[in-house]
Image (cartoon, rainbow, N blue to C red):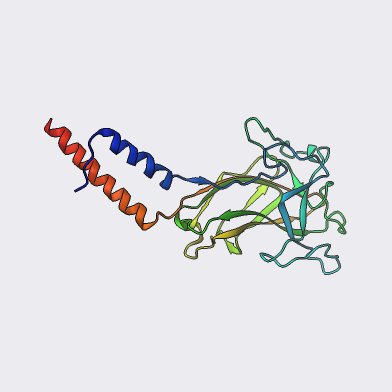
Amino acid sequence: MVRFASRSGVMFLALVFVPVLMAIPIPFVNTGLNGVYSPIAGGDVDPDWIITQIINPNPAGAIPSNCPPNTSSCAASIVIDSVVTSSGWLANTGNDITQTGSRWIWVNPVAQPTGFGPGSPVQVLIHTEFTLPVAFDPATVVISGRMASDDAVTQVSVNGVTVPGLNQAGFGAFGPTFTINLGSFGGPNPFVAGTNRLFFLLNDNIAVGGFRAELTGEYQLIPEPATWLLMGAGLVGFAAYRRRKARV
């Protein structure tokens, strides 16, 4: 039987175990901000949000960019100039002190698809990437966030696997906060070790289009067998300590 001479031994094991089971943050970058939450200027590119596809349902329209979804990237999105966002859109924000906020992005700074005239419908598939280590536990991955769009987010997916029922419409305020986890997919596990892609399919029915999102995420590692043994030893030691204390 494992014995501990004092409470300090139990406390030491607790300090060892807690980091193993702690949630590890996924460092998402909100739209229109850089990695330290400072705003990206209007007209500049946002390298963390990639335009994967632009599709014009009108057969007469051109397709300015068309890359295979979930396989390669077309180009970084562009932060929309502030003057364009003044007509009923949620105001741009971004604060590197409080680490909050987001800005509107699109395929260009004037919020119109290149090559399409006003009134021409367009779909834009955009994604951001995040990395999970080999030892991550898929059951612990949680992504939370909120989004706004002009006109609508019609589909959200992870690595090509759709999150059923997750969509949003409206640009005057953020939609409800959403959560994506393993249970959101009703069976398949879309999360992989290495690079993961979170896709948003945007639908714009009129002249102006835009998208913004604010995300957080976390996951835990799968404890190794040796860690489980150590934790078991700690529990045994803690029980012994409690019994000894009860006899005093």
Q: Which residue is outermost to the front?
A: 5
Residue drawn at x 17%, y 33% is 245
Horizontal relation, residue 94 to residue 235: left or right: right
* Count of labels in the image: 0
Horizontal relation, residue 178 to residue 170: left or right: left
Query: Please, is residue 225 above or below residue 146 in the view?
Result: below
Query: Please, is residue 66 above or below residue 16 in the view?
Result: below
Residue drawn at x 33%, y 53% is 228
Residue drawn at x 26%, y 45% is 235
Residue drawn at x 50%, y 46% is 24
Q: Position of residue 80 (x, y in %)?
A: 80, 44
Query: Please, is residue 79 above or below residue 245 in the view?
Result: below
Foreground: 134 or 179? 134
Foreground: 235 or 230? 230
Which quarter of the figure has residue 64?
Answer: bottom right
Foreground: 180 or 118? 180
Q: Position of residue 178 (x, y in %)?
A: 55, 48
Q: Position of residue 134 (x, y in %)?
A: 51, 59
Foreground: 198 or 169? 198
Viewer can see residue 166: no
Q: Which residue is outermost to the left?
A: 247
Horizontal relation, residue 127 to residue 61: left or right: left
Which quarter of the figure has residue 86?
Answer: top right
Viewer can see residue 226: yes
Which quarter of the figure has residue 103?
Answer: top right
Q: Position of residue 88 (x, y in %)?
A: 75, 38
Query: Please, is residue 73 above or below residue 92 in the view?
Result: below
